[in-house]
Amino acid sequence: MCIDTHAHLDDSRFDDDVADVIGRAVEAGVSLIINPGSGLQASRRAVELGERFECVRAAAGISPHDIDDHSPDDWRQLDELARTAPIVAIGEIGLEYHYYKDAEHRKRQQEAFRRQLDLADELDLPVIIHCREAHADLRCILSERAAGRKLSGVVHCFSGTVADAAAYIHLGLLVSFTGIITFKKAEGVRKIASAIASDNLMLETDSPYMAPEGYRGRRCEPAHVIEVAGKLAEIHGLALADIGRITSGNARRLFRLEGSDEKPAVVYPIRDSLYVNLTNRCTNCCVFCPRETEPRVKGHWLGLEHEPTSDEVIDAIGDASSYNEVVFCGFGEPTLRLETLKQVARAVKQQGGRVRVNTNGHGSMIESYDIVPELAGLVDTVSVSLNTADEQQYVELCRPQRGVEAYRAMLDFIGRAVELLPGVYVTALDYPGVDVEACKSLAAELGAQFRCRKYRHLG
Ligand code: SF4
């Protein structure tokens, strides 16, 4: 299921068949549609549509295109509407410099934008931001406003650079992409979309504009958000269901929509594999790990309320052979629960499934004996987080409970795994200051395969 976070169903092009359009969206797998207002009348109409259709939520705002069409009384009425109607955001608001080169107009846009940011602050609502050719000014205004706190909102139909996206994300905002990412000549936009972690993304159509490839020149409608989701999934190497779940979760949390409560996952699918979340305990405390702050991966909440028993995990897995792999991972070190891990792995193997263990490689140190022979026959692949080729840097980045001993124990674990297990990967993050090439060379020396993971792209 997907959420179209930006569709102007209030547009006159939908007057004759809005119910059919919404019906087609639901049939295609769209669970909710956010209808922003681009002016007072459009916002009123969005609110009406929200009241009429169960899957539509309204936002209210005056867009930079429309600021000159509104009298002081219209602005007062917008304030009143925002305070009294069931809206989920203030928007769309923002800066449009492509069509307006005049400095005076741009100044008025900035004033209108700031005024509506004040309204959103006062009502504790997120904002839906339009920005075209104005990212420098937008970043400046938003940074000033944030003054160290996190903002809440989205830069919709994102047209900036990777650096712009990073700046908005740092401020607490999300970015969303339209059907533009499906256009044949939009390689640059796809490259930017691939650099942004999916945890910071949402989907939208911007209907009736921006119809995706295959529909260009025709009216865009919310059902087309599935094309946007498909392309984003392809760009990120994920399944369509993954992108739907991740971006819908992002939208539900941003707009505080129903279903935003997150339940801990004991097992969780990503792509064609099933992951097992045995524990949140770990013998490391890596500087880049969100285990204790926000343990979410690809739309799954991994903060456990209790550590599951082997029976609970085996039940939750179901038919292990229907997955490419069953992977012990989660936010925590699975070998801290070695007996449970072995029992579950045995059950998976009995069903003809494949087993991978993602580990920090401390298992033998934890147990004070060589655990690798016990994994042989139960585990097809281990993936060990090397993270750095330098033991002092390991201590700084991974902050192991047992200091440098943990790094040396990990290297011994990798060596034994290479001897006894069919597949051994070591991984490193492209974290600032990490010499990824040195990690790759060390992996080769140890006889393991190497994989570089992208910092901030979890899962
Ligand atoms: S080893 Fe993994 S789970 Fe443990 S702190 Fe580091 S990143 Fe988090």
Image (cartoon, rainbow, N blue to C red):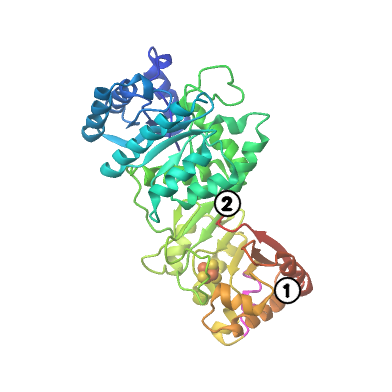
- x, y percentage for residue 212? 57, 26
The prevailing secondary structure element of the residues shown in magenta is loop
Nearest the viewer among 389 and 350 is 389
Q: Residue furthest top?
A: 16
- x, y percentage for residue 355? 61, 63
Residue at the (72%, 78%) spot, across then down: 415
Quarter holding residue 416: bottom right
Residue at the (51%, 18%) spot, across then down: 219
Which residue is the site of mark 1? 418
Query: Horizontal placement of 405 versus 53: left or right?
Result: right
SS class, disc 1? helix
Q: Where does the N terminus fall, quadrant-wise? A: top left
Mark number displayed over residue 173 = none
Label count reads 2
How busy is the neighbourhood of tag 1: few (under 14 within 10 Å), some, or many (20 plus)?
many
SS class, disc 2? helix
Mark number displayed over residue 322 = 2
Query: Horizontal placement of 30 versus 349: left or right?
Result: left
Residue at the (21%, 33%) spot, across then down: 84
Distance from disc 2 to disc 1, alpha carbons, whole Å, reads 27 Å
Residue 276 seen by the camera: yes
How busy is the neighbourhood of tag 2: few (under 14 within 10 Å), some, or many (20 plus)?
some
Badge nearest the viewer, 2 or 1: 1
Stretch in magenta: 370-379
- x, y percentage for residue 173? 44, 46
Query: Considering only order in the chain, which callout, 1 or 2, is on the residue closer to the N terminus?
Result: 2
Tell me if residue 276 is in the magenta stretch: no
Residue 380 seen by the camera: no
In contact (CB < 8 Å): disc 2 and disc 1 = no
